[in-house]
Amino acid sequence: MNRVKEHRVFMQLTQIDLARKVGAARQTINLIENNKYNPSLSLCIALAKELDTDLNTLFWEE
């Protein structure tokens, strides 16, 4: 479970917008949002930065 989609929608970004900002494919963003792909640490950091949050908020499961 992650909160990428929740934060992306809040920031009013499409999957394509976010993918371009972090240098990934739209399909990669889709797979991450659907918990079918574990992104690299560098991609996680880029996502957190673009979504104006931190890694714990974005990816930590409680």
Image: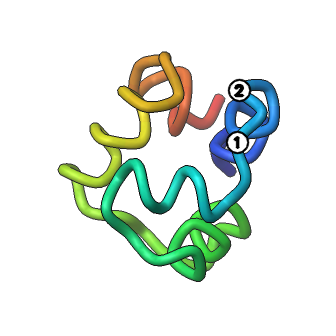
User: Crowding at label 1, few (<14), some or many (≥20) Cα neighbours within 10 Å?
Assistant: some
Q: Nearer the viewer, residue 50 or 20?
A: 20
Question: CA separation, marks 2 and 1?
Answer: 6 Å
Residue at position x 42%, y 42% in the image: 47
Residue 2 vs 11, above or below: the answer is: below
Q: Nearer the viewer, residue 55 or 9?
A: 9
Q: Which mark is residue 13?
A: 1
Relative horizontal placement of residue 36, taking residue 52 as reference (left or right): right
User: What amino acid type is highlighted by mark number 2?
Assistant: Met
User: What amino acid type is highlighted by mark number 1?
Assistant: Leu
Tell me where residue 28 appears, x and y as whole percent: 51, 76
Marks 2 and 1 close (CB-CB < 8 Å): yes
The answer to which quarter of the image holds residue 55 is top left
The answer to which quarter of the image holds residue 36 is bottom right
Tell me where residue 1 appears, x and y as whole percent: 68, 51
Tag 2, which secondary structure? loop
Tell me where residue 23 appears, x and y as whole percent: 31, 62
Residue at position x 40%, y 49% in the image: 21
Residue at position x 59%, y 53% in the image: 17
Q: How is the image coloured?
A: rainbow
